[in-house]
Image (cartoon, rainbow, N blue to C red):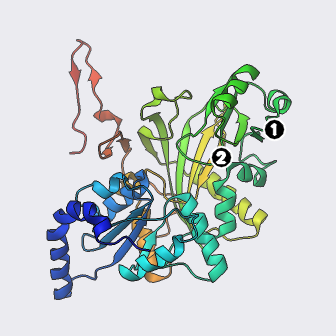
Amino acid sequence: MLPTDSALQGFFRISCSNRTMSFAKEQFAMKGVITVKNVLITGIGGLTPRSIARRIRKTHPEYRLIGCDVNPKAIGFFMDGLLDAKYVCPRCDSADYFSWIEKLVERESIDFAFVQPESEIVEWGKHFDQTGHFPCVTFMGSTELSGSLRDKAIMAEVLEGTDFIPKTIKVTQDEPRFDAVENEIGFPCWIRATEGTGGLGSLRLDDLSSYKSWLFINSEIPEFTVSEFLTGRHIANEMLYYKGEYVKGAALECAEYVMANIAPSHVTGNTSFGRLLNDKTVNEFCDSCIKYIERKLDLAAHGILSFDLKEDSKGNLKVTEVNIRHMAYTGVLAEAGFDLIEDSIRIMEDGGALRVERDPFHVFEKPFVFLRDVDIEPILLDSEDCFLAPRSDGDCQASDCNE
């Protein structure tokens, strides 16, 4: 059942500042200048959904944005001007979720949806398998692909015996496999939860004692992967596939992390400083990995796929994670000229990818870098020359970054 108006009074109070914007949209529509689209964005409390909403606000100010989240305190609900309508939704694994979503789609005349939380993507895929349709138009891959990539242990099984991943085993609280960790993987090694983002449950382990302690500390996490420790750069890559065709891809380096000191591993999964890369070898490596998965699972890649990779001591790339959605940096990449948000809109509006430029090895125009932190919009800079540099006399200077 959809929330009643009385249940949303607090949201309506916050939405008052959107009235001028909504009035302007109506005026544009009446004049025939633009076509208003109603866009649903799920998980609006998260970084990536908010980034998607901000980008659409900039490129399509005429569109109505409807956000939903299971958390009534989701920050996206309370960001002035971000949304036109806001709903607290049931959990995606609850019995009434899809009846609720279908009523919302009808009530708000939803044209298409950005489904972002991976748990929701998997559930939408299951719904499609059971009913033959999505609640509304969306852009995502098959259930088998989503399920295989979302669970890092399953992904490791699919890629086992290849050079795409580091040596990896699955462990659980009930079967910690101490001998295998010590003798097959060896120390130092890397442990992390099989599901989740933000480096959940991740840490470098230096001996068996630290492994046992980490299992005890994280007793609420049922399952982990343990892999060889990789010492090189952290690379990320965002790619668009359409019915098996690799259409677009771009890479970046995650150099530093937000609030790294609060995490035992010093890796929070949330990058504070990064570099956009013009390195086609990253795209080639990721595409070859996806093609291997397609053959192994007998399916066609479809949707947005976001890679996390680490280099080993010799500079070889290894896949550590593949997300089945836009990455958190999708808005930054869009600002730099690689806009998979707009491409997704074109695919959902057109029912095909004819208007999407084929750009499998995107080259950025400048050596862009970006800065991110909590409670602030990301900042895109032309290059690292923007940063303060000490003069020989001890004074500091700063170049003009974006002139």
- One can see residue 214 in this view: yes
Amino acid type at mark 2? Val
Total label count? 2
Image marks 2 and 1: residues in contact by CB distance under 8 Å: no
Mark 2 Cα shell of 10 Å, populated few (<14), some (14-19), many (≥20):
many
The residue shown at (26%, 60%) is: 10
Residue 16 to residue 153: above or below: below
| Residue 55 percent coordinates (x, y) | 33, 61
Q: Earlier in the sequence, mark 2 or mark 1?
A: 1
Residue 231 to residue 164: above or below: above
Residue 279 to residue 304: above or below: above
Q: Give residue 391's quadrant in the image.
A: top left
The residue shown at (45%, 73%) is: 356
Residue 301 to residue 386: above or below: below
Using the image, tell me which numbered label, if any, was put on residue 319.
2
Q: Residue beneath label 1, please?
A: 175
Distance Cα–Cα, label 2 vs label 1:
25 Å
Q: For this rendering, which residue is in front, 78 or 38?
A: 78
Q: Is residue 349 toward the left or the right of residue 94 in the image?
A: left
